[in-house]
């Protein structure tokens, strides 16, 4: 019997097929992967430790950098964790504004995903379209928060400022535009025989193993599992808007995960419209905090979570009664999806499908190396 001879290939950390600063070490037999090993360590940031040396308000400016493509769930988790320990109330309008920000963040994250997923199979045109359309959402963020990527807008007690005059109308207009553009995306990506052939049956996650392996978000829903934090454990006012969990795509492959996201971006647009319709015109947007340099949070801990575009995103916040966090631990989807899950499902796949599978899982290297 011939002894198997394998070749080692390093994909990343600087490679267009990698979703960020990470590397996947592959052992291949021909063009078939027999072993995969994820390597991180190219960012060296350690934000969890940095927060232990910043006061409660200064730490708020750090968390958004834990995942660059979608920073806002980090702000939401940190703010709610602090509020839960302290018992601080959040004004009604601020909670609606938070939902607006979170759903706009979901839409821009999915537009970014469109670009990465399509480029992984050589369909570059849709990426140019979606990144250009994403800029219209970033324009809204810039107007609202002053920043296009890092917003530092959702903070303990509410949000930093109220909506600008005429902002609602501009959001409606952008939502109408993006919704129409999605039909073009469908024709170019989902109706494309190349993507269908490349995505169907590839990157399979055994449904019976998904929960055990810690899979969340679109990859979990693509197994047919009905799971969404916004419905399972509602926060803000998600129990007052109508939407469904797309558990009807059950093939558990790259194709199903793409269909889930295709459904959810349209649903996020609908949620944004509901939020704007229900949001009160007037009212406070922040419950003012004490002097940040003297602000002490009572001793206690809290675990809070949101449903990010990549799945369940959790924060464990601990206070020892001082003006500094004792511990802030982040449990994001990327750590599981980009390491343990990716290493498992790449085995037996073709080397040309690595980038496509990685994009379908929603890996975010900065979140792994936090």
Image (cartoon, rainbow, N blue to C red):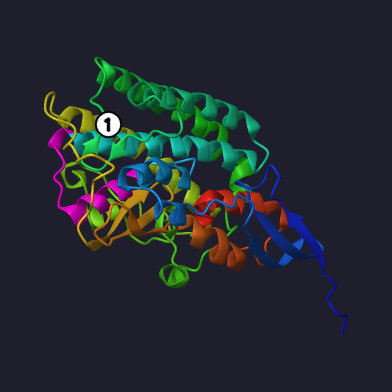
The crowd level at tag 1 (other Cα within 10 Å; few <14, some 14-19, many 20+) is some
Q: Is residue 311 left or right of residue 39?
A: left
Q: Write down the region rendered in magenta.
A: 75-93
Find disc 1 in the rendering and name its residue: 160
Residue found 37% across the figure and 35% down from its top: 152
Check the image and name the residue furthest to the front.
294
Residue 170 occupies quadrant = top left
Front residue (pair 91, 52): 52
- In the image, what residue occupies the spot 31% across and 23% down? 171
Q: Position of residue 15 (x, y in %)?
A: 71, 45
Secondary structure under badge 1?
loop
Vertical order, 364 against 135 (above or below): below
Residue 209 sits above or below residue 334 on the image = below
Residue extending farthest to the right is 2
Give the quarter of the image for residue 182: top left
Magenta-colored stretch includes residue 79: yes
240 versus 226 height, above or below: above
Identify the image quadrant of the N terminus: bottom right
For this rendering, which residue is in front, 102 or 197? 102
Q: Main secondary structure of the magenta part?
A: helix
Q: How many marks?
A: 1
Task: Tell me the quarter of the picture where residue 164 sits.
Answer: top left
| Residue 241 pos. (x, y %) | 19, 41
Q: From this viewpoint, is residue 337 visible?
A: yes
Q: Can you give x and y, in whole percent of width and height, for residue 334 in the image?
A: 49, 55
Q: Is residue 248 visible?
A: no
């Amino acid at each position: 019997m011939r002894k198997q001879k394998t070749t080692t290939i390093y994909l990343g950390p600087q490679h267009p097929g990698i979703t960020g600063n990470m590397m996947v070490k592959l052992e291949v037999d021909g063009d078939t992967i027999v072993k995969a090993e994820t390597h991180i360590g190219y960012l060296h940031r350690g934000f969890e430790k940095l927060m232990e040396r910043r006061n409660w308000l200064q730490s708020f400016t750090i968390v958004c950098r834990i995942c660059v493509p979608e920073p806002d769930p980090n702000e939401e988790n940190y703010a709610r964790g602090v509020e839960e320990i302290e018992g601080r109330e959040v004004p009604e309008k601020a909670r609606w504004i938070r939902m607006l920000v979170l759903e706009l963040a979901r839409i821009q994250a999915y537009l970014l995903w469109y670009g990465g997923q399509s480029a992984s199979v050589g369909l570059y045109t849709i990426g140019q379209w979606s990144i250009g359309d994403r800029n219209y959402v970033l324009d809204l963020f810039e107007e609202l928060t002053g920043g296009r990527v890092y917003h530092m807008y959702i903070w303990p007690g509410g949000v930093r400022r109220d909506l600008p005059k005429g902002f609602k109308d501009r959001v409606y207009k952008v939502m109408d535009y993006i919704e129409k553009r999605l039909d073009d995306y469908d024709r170019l990506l989902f109706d494309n025989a190349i993507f269908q052939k490349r995505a169907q049956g590839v990157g399979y996650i055994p449904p019976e193993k998904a929960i055990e392996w810690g899979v969340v978000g679109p990859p979990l829903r693509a197994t047919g599992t009905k799971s969404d934090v916004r419905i399972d454990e509602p926060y803000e006012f998600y129990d007052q808007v109508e939407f469904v969990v797309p558990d009807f795509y059950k093939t558990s492959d790259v194709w199903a995960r793409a269909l889930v996201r295709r459904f959810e971006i349209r649903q996020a647009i609908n949620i944004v419209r509901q939020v704007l319709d229900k949001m009160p015109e007037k009212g406070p947007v922040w419950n003012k905090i004490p002097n940040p340099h003297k602000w002490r949070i009572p001793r206690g801990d809290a675990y809070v979570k949101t449903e990010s575009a990549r799945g369940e995103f959790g924060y464990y916040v601990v206070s020892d009664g001082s003006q500094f966090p004792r511990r802030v631990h982040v449990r994001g989807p990327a750590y599981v999806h980009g390491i343990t899950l990716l290493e498992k499902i790449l085995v037996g796949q073709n080397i040309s499908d690595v980038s496509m599978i990685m994009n379908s899982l929603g890996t975010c290297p900065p979140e792994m190396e936090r």
